[in-house]
Image (tube, helix red, strand yellow):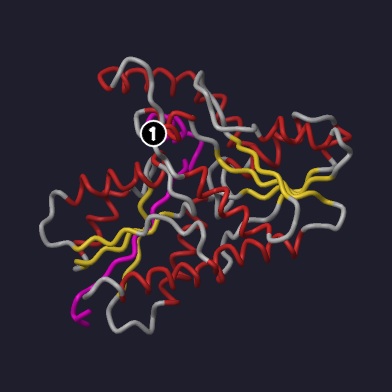
Amino acid sequence: MSGSKKTAVILLAMGGPDSLDGIGRYLYNIFSDRSLIRLPGGRLIQRPLAKLIASIRTKKVQAHYDLIGGSSPLLKWTDMQLEHILNGLQDCDQVISGYVGMRYYAPLIEDAIKNAYTDGCRQLVFLPMYPQYCTATTGSSFEVVEQVLSNYDDILAVMIDDFHDNKAYTDLLREYIDSNIAEDETLLFSAHSIPKKFIDEGDPYVDQTRRTVELAAGKREYFLSFQSRSGPVEWVGPDTVEETRRLLSKGWKLFVVPVSFVCDHIETLYELDIKLPQLVSAHDSDSIKRMPMFNDDIRFGRLLAELVRERINGSGN
């Protein structure tokens, strides 16, 4: 690549509210996205229904966020990883800038692209912070990217679909497991669930998740479950709560590994740390331990930097 061409690394993630007051807007944005949630009635009434559902759920979700500090730490951790990535790319023979683009809350994907372009970047590397590809997450973010890029005719876009079986990633995940699991604990991976309809339509998420789990577990015995299921549709299972109860009933202690997440946010801090223990007996709750997330671990940033480096070097520029 010519040293005069500026490149931008844009990290893509779901986003999260920065205050309790922002939760209504955050929920509306989520329920408005048919790539994530297909409300009945088709596209014409998706947004009116999304507004209604968001208004109904806001207070309940505010209570959940209040228990984890009143906001999502997702942007904080993503910003830190972006810094690690840029530091890992300092030896590249080109100027590389970094931006964060969130799907449902500021800073939005469209703003990240606009800022990168204004700063003179003409090659944009899009790196979703989802290890496994899913239509509802990476796919939805890529849809926004494509819509925004249709307004430009001089941008080269480089899309990194996933890193579910990247050796550095699965090795780091295994190291986290080995460093934190006790000898008497059973390994339970918990991934975000998706509607079964997505799988029927060819979504690779579940297969990629199973591959990640297989590589990260190594020779350990493990179980895989799925969390965050809601709404009257058929979801991929088994459900994390039900699987936890089943395994605890055998007298086992569990080491829970959130496998479709790379940093702490509502799904780990509330669903796994607070809600899951509440849904089992007080005695059994002492038999559940969660693996810490990568958060600001520089090793994670370095492996992401190598992913970006490989794609830049292989782009033919």
Q: Nearer the viewer, residue 217 or 31?
A: 217
Residue 252, horizontal then vertical, whole percent:
86, 42
The stretch in magenta equals: 1-29
Residue 97 magenta-highlighted: no
- Residue at (62% x, 61% y) in the render: 173
Residue 124 quadrant: bottom left
The answer to whether residue 312 is above or below residue 14 is: below
Give the residue furthest to the left: 153
Quick one: label 1, few (<14), some, or many (20+) residues within 10 Å? few
Task: Assign a secondary structure to mark 1.
Answer: loop
Say which of 69 and 84 sits in front.
Answer: 84
Question: Front-most of 228 and 298?
Answer: 228
Residue type at mark 1 is Glu
Which quadrant holds the C terminus?
bottom left
- Residue sitting at 50 percent across and 72 percent down? 302
Which x, y percent locates residue 143? 28, 43
Q: Residue 96 appears at what percent x and percent y? A: 31, 73
| Residue at left offset 47%, top offset 43% | 16
Q: Which residue is mark 1?
A: 201
Classify residue 174 as left or right of residue 43. Answer: right
